[in-house]
Image (cartoon, rainbow, N blue to C red):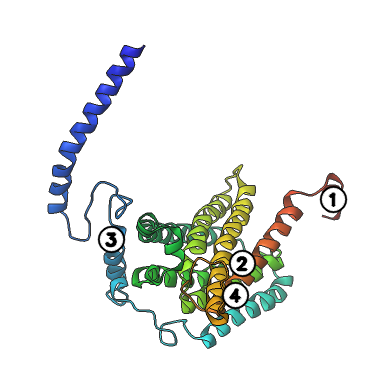
Amino acid sequence: MEMEMEVEAAAAASFIEIVEDVAPGYLSYINANTPAFFQVGVPSIKRPFGVHLWPLFNQLVSTISGGKFVPDEFHYVEGETFMSTPFEVAVVIGLYYFIITFGQVVFKNLTAWKLNYPFQLHNLVLTTVSGVLLALLFEQIFPIVVEHGVLYSVCSPNSWYEKVVVIYYLNYLTKYLEFVDTFFLVVKKKKIIFLHAYHHGATALLCYIQLNGETSVSWVPILLNLGVHVIMYWYYFLAARGIRVWWKQWITRFQIIQFILDLIFVYSTTYTFYADKYSREWGIWIPNMGTCYGTPFAASTGCLILSSYLVLFIMFYISIYKKTPAAKKDSKKTK
């Protein structure tokens, strides 16, 4: 038995040596015969996927948009960039609530629309977009966390730079695309609960505030949210195709876990921001980890909205999945 293990270990070591000898030359050959934006290599801290995703993304988006949107040349400017003014945000969110309120009145006496294929496409698009943005953001943040540490990544102004801002901005725009979730519920004559409508509007507002507040900790809630949305919209896509899955409850659980992790980071960075600020102003030392990059308004708003999400999602989970047997019987009788 020991001899077999030694032989297997020797074979594995030989294989690794061969790969280490051959791989660099093979990869060099590939890179020499492929476009500059598609360069492959062994996965590393700087290139966690083995391929630099950003150049591919930049080339693809630039080509699809006909050069009208080039990620490498994009600069977010508050008040100038599309959907960067309070007026635009207020109008769009206001229209969202008006349409779903008025729409429910209109469809009250109409036959529900099925729209199954458009609904499938909508969810497939969102799960794909979320996955792409998730991979792009991970590629940018992973090297910062590994090389400089978590605290640096959530507090340093160096964690807020053009490439991540492009990702944050595109993520922000998807929040308006997600409004379509509710429009489907309206035309299908499905019940729209407070949590659903509140969450969509508040999240668009939250992303807008954080984008303008330039909070370095933004990558934590955005990365987690994108991960959850990949799973959630994939579930909706499968459900629209009539495919039942066993992990439905885990979607809400993942959302709750997401908000708990969000709040750990957001409250910690907000605390150390204010502790450092008042230590300097009052001339007394308050335990802190140094200042954190971002505006006080963005930090406070983030704490407030994310806290409300956690409370509402826990209440939703309890009401749906943790009913007592008696409550379940009563709910069935009233249906």
Q: Report x, y in % for residue 228.
A: 53, 55
Mark 2–mark 4 distance (CA, rounded to whole Å): 10 Å
Q: Report x, y in % for residue 289.
A: 50, 65
- Under mark 3, the amino acid is Leu
Mark 2–mark 1 distance (CA, rounded to whole Å): 29 Å
Q: Give the number of the mark in front: 2 or 1.
A: 2
Residue receiving disc 3? 56
- Image: 230 above or below 105: above
Residue drawn at the location 54% of the way across and 88% of the way down: 87
- Under mark 1, the amino acid is Ala
- Image: 210 above or below 196: below
Chain-order first, disc 2 or disc 4: 4
Residue 139 appears left or right of 270 = left
Residue receiving disc 2? 306
| Of 239 and 71, the residue lying toward us | 71
- Under mark 4, the amino acid is Ser
Circle 3/circle 1 CB separation < 8 Å:
no
Q: Quadrant of residue 93?
A: bottom right
**SS label for mark 3:** helix
Chain-order first, disc 4 or disc 3: 3
Res 228 label: none
Q: Report x, y in % for residue 157.
A: 40, 72
Residue receiving disc 4? 300
Residue receiving disc 1? 327
Residue drawn at the location 59% of the way across and 52% of the way down: 254
Q: Give the number of the mark in front: 2 or 4.
A: 4
Mark 4–mark 3 distance (CA, rounded to whole Å): 36 Å
Chain-order first, disc 2 or disc 1: 2
Chain-order first, disc 3 or disc 1: 3
User: Is the C terminus in the top left, top right, bottom left or bottom right quadrant?
Assistant: bottom right
**SS label for mark 4:** helix
